[in-house]
Image (tube, helix red, strand yellow):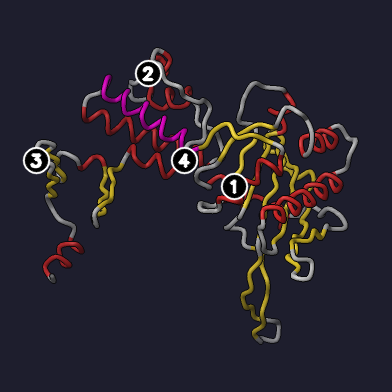
Amino acid sequence: MVIKQIVVHQLLDDPEQEGIVPVPADQSLQTSGSLDAMLNHLLETYNKKANKHYGVFDDDGQGFPFSLTEYLNNRQNFMALSSALLQKVCTVFNEAGLRGSSYLLCADYMEGMTRYFLFCLLTDHVSVTVTHDLSITDCAYLDLTSMPMACRINLTIWQQGSDTDRYLSYSVPGGKHRLQQVVPEIISGSESGGSREEADKLVDVVTDYCQKTSSEDDRIVVKQQVYDYCCQQLKDGEDVSLAGITHQLSESGQDDFARFVNTQDYDMTVPMSPDRRTLIRLVRYSGRGKGISLSFDAGLLGSQVCYDPDTDKLVIHGVPDNLKKQLNQK
């Protein structure tokens, strides 16, 4: 990874101003080993985010896409671009009634031959540290494990004018509905899909494929291979592709997955970045309701766990020791 430009601005929640006030930095940061490590950490955190949203810029070419184009064409510098984004974030947050101080990090960087623009909100926390004279004092630090809002644009694909509807992605923590609603307004973009929906579709497709082409034992192997491949791609920050899944399965003799998908009427988005927590359904059965919560490896069904649909009973052979102990103490 090579950082081309990076800066941190502040969003200050000022009670006297009754809103969030932008505090722009005077200049961009000089690249260093510490900055490289910090950005790498942030990208790893972002790649692991569940339920990302994907989209494209609006066609009117106004707002943030216009400023970004001016920057990429060397008609606007990085500080002007990031400061305008800071002002937009503050304006939208105030209009939406969102409060709280934070920092806005903006970065233009390269990964291999691909250029990206990332911006994210970071919050600081207070902890304690030991000084040189062994006394204890408070210290503030940036929380790199939690990003209240983050957005990444694949500049290379966007500039190529590709037909893809996935060159920008953004992530907002679950339950932050107001924050989720304002992100498209900040970037002047529209959502085209979500990772949870993509995962649901992929699980359905793989399940259908297994039921029609594989034996019961092979189904477990195929689902595990698809799950492992997807998790590795997500960990590496890479998309999941139909060709990649097919290649993964071809190593065990299953080379017709792509043909199966292409000959069926599946509205399947490829490439994709499916939600990891939803993909777990490929390798585990789980459910909850009426005070009961169950979860077990798919490979146990039919051996340690047996289900009879006629009587609607689930029988567990070999109760886990810790559960057995609790049951015996009732």
Looking at the rendered structure, which numbered label has been put on residue 180?
1
Q: What residue does disc 3 label?
A: 311
Within 10 Å of the Cα at label 4, are there few (<14), some (14-19), or many (20+) other Cα atoms? many
Q: Secondary structure at mark 2?
A: loop
Query: Residue 101 is drawn in which quadrant?
Result: bottom right
Within 10 Å of the Cα at label 2, are there few (<14), some (14-19), or many (20+) other Cα atoms? some
- Between circles 2 and 3, the one closer to the viewer is 3
Q: CA distance from mark 2 to mark 3?
A: 38 Å
Looking at the rendered structure, which numbered label has been put on residue 275?
4
Figure check: 232 above or below 32: above
The magenta stretch spans residue 321: no
Query: From which residue to which does the magenta span run?
Result: 195-213
Q: Earlier in the sequence, mark 4 or mark 2?
A: 2
- Name the residue: 80% across, 48% down: 82
- Between circles 4 and 2, the one closer to the viewer is 4
95, 322: nearer the viewer: 95
Q: CA distance from mark 3 to mark 4?
A: 34 Å
Q: Are marks 4 and 2 in contact (CB under 8 Å)?
A: no
Q: CA distance from mark 4 to mark 1?
A: 17 Å
Q: CA distance from mark 2 to mark 1?
A: 40 Å
Q: What residue does disc 2 label?
A: 255
